[in-house]
Amino acid sequence: MAYITVRGVEHYYEWIKQPSGIAKPVMVFIHGWAGSARYWRSTAHALSEQFDCLLYDLRGFGRSQGKPTVVGASESVAEAQTNQQKSQAIQELTYELTEYAEDLAVLLDELQLGRVYINAHSMGASVATIFFNCYPQRVERGILTCSGIFEYDEKAFAAFHKFGGYVVKFRPKWLGKIPFVDQMFMARFLHRPIPKSERQAFLEDFLSADYDTALGTIFTSVSKAQSELMPQEFAKLQVPTLLVAGEYDQIIPAQMGRQAAALNNQVKFVVIPDTGHFPMLEDAATYLQQVREFLQVATPELQAN
């Protein structure tokens, strides 16, 4: 397990690579709200013949810290100074998606990575869209999975925030031990079944997400400001982008993705039939086919021939 300090906060990251005698381009994967890099592993493994795949957990989710280590009495002076610096750094951070885009920029700097490909999902796709516009020179091509634009509805947003607050607050660890709870938890996200291990991993990530982060990002990702910002972000994209939607996605309906793609001819829009919010897991073969066609890379079978 590898960790790196990004803007004063410890972030988890991992590489998925295949041994090769030639340098490969890097593809960075970004997960969605309350998830972690874990659900991107199967996709990364499938693309690892063409790319060195970098997966990481967003601040406050998965294995990444939401806050710096608290200074303790038993710490050395050096450790105390380091933790004080972390505390000062985190005080300047917010849960705005623009801040998460800056986290990514610093992560790439720390790992000495230049121009990369990016594949991002759900809330992570909003982060990536902002990153594409802030740092277009650092992105070769982008893939946004389950993303789009939405209209502001004051009553609906207020109800969503209230419900989201209850969901984040009531997360007892014993919930994960109840039989079939992973199926019930993921039912709204999926149209097709996925492996039990994937369902359990997502439930574990949800239960372990930092409280302030989980709640804070609900308010920043679903807000009036965000509903006004994202159409502008999609309209000014310069990076060639593939936007993939699940036909029966209840979280971010395919129509929202279609509306976003219509704002910019740099965006190619595709719908994966009979899938929900995780098309890369529900129909991996079709998803990978669309991604490879967009990236103009051959499938492993074609390469072998």
Image (cartoon, grey):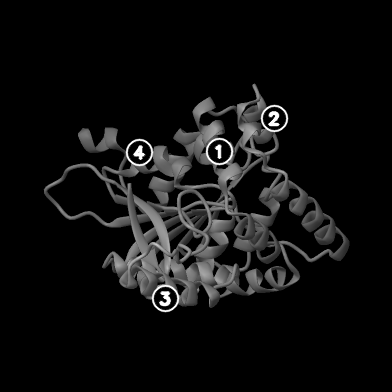
- Residue drawn at the location 67% of the way across and 39% of the way down: 172
- Disc 3 from disc 2: Cα separation: 42 Å
Local secondary structure at mark 1: helix
The residue under label 1 is: 204
Amino acid type of disc 2? Met
Mark 4 Cα shell of 10 Å, populated few (<14), some (14-19), many (≥20): some
- Disc 2 from disc 1: Cα separation: 14 Å
Q: Is label 3 or label 1 in front?
A: 3
Amino acid type of disc 3? Gln
The residue under label 4 is: 46
Q: Which mark is residue 196?
A: none
Counting residues from the N terminus, which is met first, the one under dot 4 or under dot 2? Answer: 4
- Disc 3 from disc 4: Cα separation: 40 Å
In this view of the protein, can residue 123 be seen by the observer?
Answer: yes
- Disc 3 from disc 1: Cα separation: 31 Å
Percent across and percent down for residue 199 are: 56, 32
Local secondary structure at mark 3: helix
The residue under label 3 is: 85
Counting residues from the N terminus, which is met first, the one under dot 3 or under dot 2? Answer: 3
Counting residues from the N terminus, which is met first, the one under dot 2 or under dot 1? Answer: 2
Mark 3 Cα shell of 10 Å, populated few (<14), some (14-19), many (≥20): some
Mark 2 Cα shell of 10 Å, populated few (<14), some (14-19), many (≥20): few
Q: Is label 4 or label 1 in front?
A: 1
